Amino acid sequence: MPPDNYPSSVLELNDVLITLDGQELISISDRIEPGEVLTVMGSSGSGKSTLLAYIGGFLDPVFEATGDIILCGRNIAKLPAEQRRVGILFQDPLLFPHMSVGGNLVFAIPATFRGKVARKNIAEQALNEAGLDGFFNRDPATLSGGQKARVALMRVLLGEPDALLLDEPFSKLDAARRGKIREFVLGEAKRRKLPVLLVTHDHADADAAGGRVFELSGE
């Protein structure tokens, strides 16, 4: 996994406007520095996830969106999702059920890392960093919610994203696990100097992130 001197990046949203049937949902311009978290607050259906979809490159065509998305100095707004180098963590871990825990991680490792043994070693190191040493051959179905969340994050990070989008990834965890997983996710993003955009309706998430908060109007 990347060392503490992992290259940093910046995410800029310039005059981003998203509408549905001519009705404005989101209008935002902001800059997220390396290791910084911008939290977007709003109730369900307010458009939080729609903003992430636009940044990530999978916005439903029923929406209209304009504005530049500048990541590491390049405008990715018109690029296909696979070329944007944006990682996203959803509410559900979305681990592949037909693969082992280790297989899920190996799948995400870029093709530039060649060799079965080398790729397995990278995945095992990621599991070790996540506190899941020895879990490589485990079935994802046998993991707890918190363990699945850790694997999902490491899978995203192994893809070497330049920015991280968080779509309420803590909302389905029980109270006992939520704080620990939140600390782990945000801590890993900060260590890797990734700009993070977190969408949530939970003020505890915003407080833990510690950055600026953008509240959607019309909640």
Image: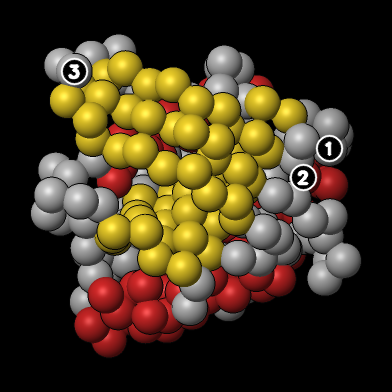
| Residue shown at 27% from the left, 75% from the top | 203
| Residue shown at 56% from the left, 28% from the top | 68
Query: For the residue labelled by badge 3, is the local secondary structure a helix, a strand or a loop?
Result: loop
Which residue lies under the disc numbered 2? 119
Which residue lies under the disc numbered 1? 113
Above or below, 67 against 36 in this view is above
Taking the view exactly as shown, the residue that stands out farthest to the bottom is 176
Q: Are marks 2 and 1 in contact (CB under 8 Å)?
A: yes
In the picture, the disc for residue 22 is 3
Quadrant location of residue 98? top left
Quadrant housing the N terminus:
bottom right
Q: Position of residue 126 (x, y in %)?
A: 67, 62
Q: Amino acid at mark 3?
A: Gly
Q: Residues within 10 Å of mark 1 (few under 14, many from 20)?
A: few
Marks 2/1: CA–CA distance: 7 Å
Q: Amino acid at mark 2?
A: Arg
Q: Position of residue 32 (x, y in %)?
A: 60, 55
Among the two numbered marks 2 and 1 on one chain, the one whose residue lies closer to the N terminus: 1
User: Can residue 124 be seen in the rendering of this structure?
Assistant: no
User: Can residue 5 be seen in the rendering of this structure?
Assistant: yes
